[in-house]
Amino acid sequence: MIKLQEINKTYQVGGSPLRALCDVSLQIASGEYLSVMGPSGSGKSTLLNMIGLLDRPDSGRYWFDTVATEELSEERRARLRGENIGFIFQQFHLINRLSAFENIELPMMLAGHPLKQRRNTVADVLAMVGLSARASHKPNQLSGGQLQRVAIARAIVMRPRLLLADEPTGNLDSHSGGEVVDVLEKLNQDGITLIVVTHDQTLGDRAKRHIRMVDGRIHSDHSGDTRSQQRVEKRGKNSVDETD
Amino acid sequence: MSMRLTDQFTFNRQLFLRHRVRTLLLLLAVAIGVASVILLTSLGEGARGYVDREFSALGNRILAVLPGRKETTGGGPPIYGAVPRDLTLEDANALATIPGVLAVAPIVAGTTTVAYSNRSREVITLGSTDAFFAVRQLDVGAGRVLSPRSRSEPLAVCVLGVKVKRELFGSSRALGEWVRVGDRRMRVIGVLEERGESLGLDMRDMLLIPVRTAEQLFDSPSLFRILLDIAPSADSDKIEQKILTVIRKRHDGEEDVTVISQDSMLAAFDSILVTLTLAIAAIASISLLVAGILIMNISLISVSQRRKEIGLLKAIGASSRQIKQLFIGESLLLMSMGSAAGITFAFSLILIFARLWPSFPLQPPVWAVPAALLVAFGTGLVFSIMPAKQAAALDPVLALRGLQP
Amino acid sequence: MNLRDSSGWIFRALWMQRTRTLLTIIGFSIGIAAMVLLSALGEGLRVFVLNEFTQFGSHIIAVNPGKTETFGIGGLLNTTRPLSLSDASAIGRLANVEEVVPVVMGNAKVKFGQRARYTDVAGVGGAADKAWKLELAQGRFLPADDLQRARALVVLGSKVKDELFAGLNPVGSFVRIGSERFRVVGVAAPKGEFLGTDLDDMVFIPAGKGMQLFNRQSLMEIDIYFNPRATSEAMADKIRRFLIDRHGFEDFTLVTQDQVLATMDNILTILTFAGAGLGAISLLVGAVGITTILMITVSERTAEVGLLRALGGTTNTVRTLFLGEALVLGLIGGVCGIALVALFLLLIYLFVPDLPVALSPTIVFGALSLSMIIGLLAGGQPAASAAKMTPIDALRAE
């Protein structure tokens, strides 16, 4: 479903270049559940943005399904994003003046779906995240966990095949965080591809495939709960031990 | 306890630098308003100055006596010039004896054809005397003016306006030549200097002949106007009364003339132009009002964006009065910077204009800058009170949390 | 994103920030109102003056003696090239000429018994009442006498009649004008002013008598009213050739009503534009206001822009939404401005009912289009900067 090939990305930070991604190659199949971990500034969020088509690589190639995305116009990328990818942010990014229902409706509105269809779909996803009773509440009337569940509902309302979550539990207490993770994992079980970027080891460990990033490179990439050291790639010497 | 002014300036400067674009746009708005007030009033004042100069170019005080009278007040003077009882040359001579009258120029006016060899031209012809040149401060560029003999004798001489001369003679010499005026022949004794228009009369396209000659030419003893040059020290109202008395005596008790004084005409022009200038200034200051509303809007936004900062200030001991002072000071500072920009812009435009059209110098009336500043600061003050009050009323605890009250 | 959703979004966003929206609209509407009001006043003045000129019809040609441009006062001066009464009667016999009014104007004392009044005296022909649309309050107008041998009859203007006769019926009485006695045959109905001349403070006598009274050899003007089927160029040409034939050469000046109207129209249109320009200054400041507020809005809603992009919104969508806000601000500002003007015009109508200032559909439509255009221009820069943001940068801004 996703194929990255030697992706490079450099940012200018305070006048000096910062290599956020360095020759990153990665393949993700449909239905996978990935966690991306690593220290701050290791490039995990950049990788997520790259996969989410929010950012363009300086060099390298990225196929989404069979589409070579780096050649697409900004408008085409936006459409691809709207139809296939759902985002979940640490800060929720809900619009305060809109109700929960309207926030969830937003992607469909941007895609120009008719009102009736929107109503039904939104009602469905609201039920799915267990917030049917809160449809008309504004964000400031909801708790943190509820906010993130609204954000998840918004992310899946277009029935995307890929869900990208950037620290989805970062602003939540452990109870609400657990609720949110439950919802996300249920979606994954229903077939959606889920990529979670997190600092939280417990959350990261729940994924079926673990990617660890250090200094813009994929440091390790192994699958399964067994932590069998199934190292893929890396030209550099990966001397960091994974026993933390 | 109050904050020192320099501290306040520093505080505001940091704010302006943080919101550079916003501040620049605000300054632009204020500058447009101030500049337009100054420029537009300068235009009005320039027109007034122009008229004043046109009148004072005559250098002296003139009264004009017109035949006919209308009793409707507020109406214009009787412009038709046709009356049953003519204003005559004898009337003019009688007016010359009034003390305080320096010179009397009777004028017979008409249109006639003036021709030289095969070229001819239809022009306005004024029949007058040497006094006309003195009263209107006209001079010849070549030759000489009408002589004092023109007061009483129908001399066959004429003085040409420059345009008439050019049309008839081209570049060849006109002095001493004979031209045909109507059905008479007259000798050219002078060509007027190039002075262009004066009070709407294009003196370049005119012909001047002795008054007696004009009477014969137009077969009419009636004068179109009598111009009187009065002494600078004389009371023009008194002289007006005397003129009416003399005319009444000569016209069997009828007061069938109208006297117009240059002073009253000037005053009328002045009051029209001053009114116009004030009206324009008022319209231009509407833009300052709009700028004031914009400043209030921005200040309100600024208050809501800076809730935390205001809360902090209060928490560390700022009084409500100081908070108010900060916000009002900010708006006044904006107004003064904007006004300075506007004044600079307006005056540079005025300078450029003066280079390009030196004959019509723009001069802002003395009240323009103070008035513009007054309106600017007035609106700045009025429109910053509400936001400042809002800021001062913030609860520090809530504000620090960035919460709405 | 469809239109309904976009507009819903825009109104919602504006409503969330009512205070700033309101203030922006007030500022802009004052600007629009200033501009619309001043152009409406200019337009009103234009219509008023043109009406004054066309109240006598527009198929008029005036002939003045003398061939020179003298700001229209040529006829008032003496001339060695007279226009005679026989010129007038001869022109009257031309085809398509409906009325000919010879005119000589002056100022004289009109006396009845012990009462006297200095007033304007118009020496005219018997057709002047039709041509000048004079209504008679009493009696009749001057008869269509032979111009050369007109009788000493007079029609009084209403003000002259009031001054000299008060409540008495003047018809049949004799008044003295200059040295001659005139029999009053009629009294004109009040007509008001025409360009500063009080038409009621005037008496009408036959042109021939006027020329005698004022001792003039020439008429000041001949007004020719021609059949609307003829064009004014053709008529002017015909009259010009006819008079050249009579006089030997062109010693007169022809002015058609069309020319006068065109000149007046030009001057007054320029005046209207000047007025609109004055008002436009305030509008400009209002536009700066919209720009400023939108720029602030964009910077406050940066994260929202990022979100919209992440959720599949295109740069176009983002631009449209912010331009839409500007457009709506401009439009509402325009509507409020026009409402403000309407209120003002109502006041003007109540206090100065004579000045026909009206909100023409053209002005209303023009003002609304202008406010939208200015709104779009003012919103252009902020909308572009919103559209230009990369989604990640926008999302990061907090």
Image (spheres, rainbow, N blue to C red):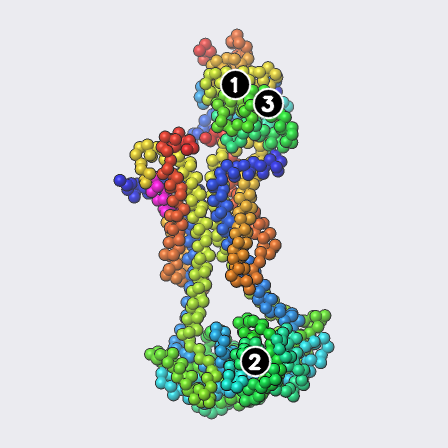
Badge 3: how crowded within 10 Å, few (<14), some, or many (20+)?
Answer: many
Tell me the residue that label 3 is attached to.
A125
Tell me the residue that label 1 is attached to.
A180
What chain is tagged by disc 3?
A
Q: Quadrant where the C terminus of chain B lies? A: top left
The residue type indicated by label 2 comes to Leu
Mark 3 and mark 1: Cα distance apart in space: 14 Å
Q: Give the residue at the far front of this rendering.
A: C167
**Does any portion of residue B62 appear in the rendered image?**
yes
What chain is tagged by disc 2?
C
Mark 1 and mark 2: Cα distance apart in space: 104 Å
> Which sits in the foreground, B250 or C398?
B250
- What secondary structure characterizes most of the magenta part? helix
Q: Position of residue C211 (x, y in %)?
A: 59, 85
Number of numbered callouts drawn:
3
Q: Magenta residues?
A: B323-334
- Name the residue rendered at 58%, 38% in the picture: C7
Tell me the residue that label 2 is attached to.
C168
Q: Are marks 3 and 1 on the same chain?
A: yes
- The residue tagged with tag 3: helix, strand or loop? helix
The residue type indicated by label 3 comes to Val
Is C29 located above or below residue B68 in the figure?
above
Is A60 located above or below residue C175 in the figure?
above
Q: Position of residue B63 (x, y in %)?
A: 42, 79
Task: Between label 2 and label 3, give the one nearer the viewer.
Answer: 2
**Does any portion of residue A44 appear in the rendered image?**
no
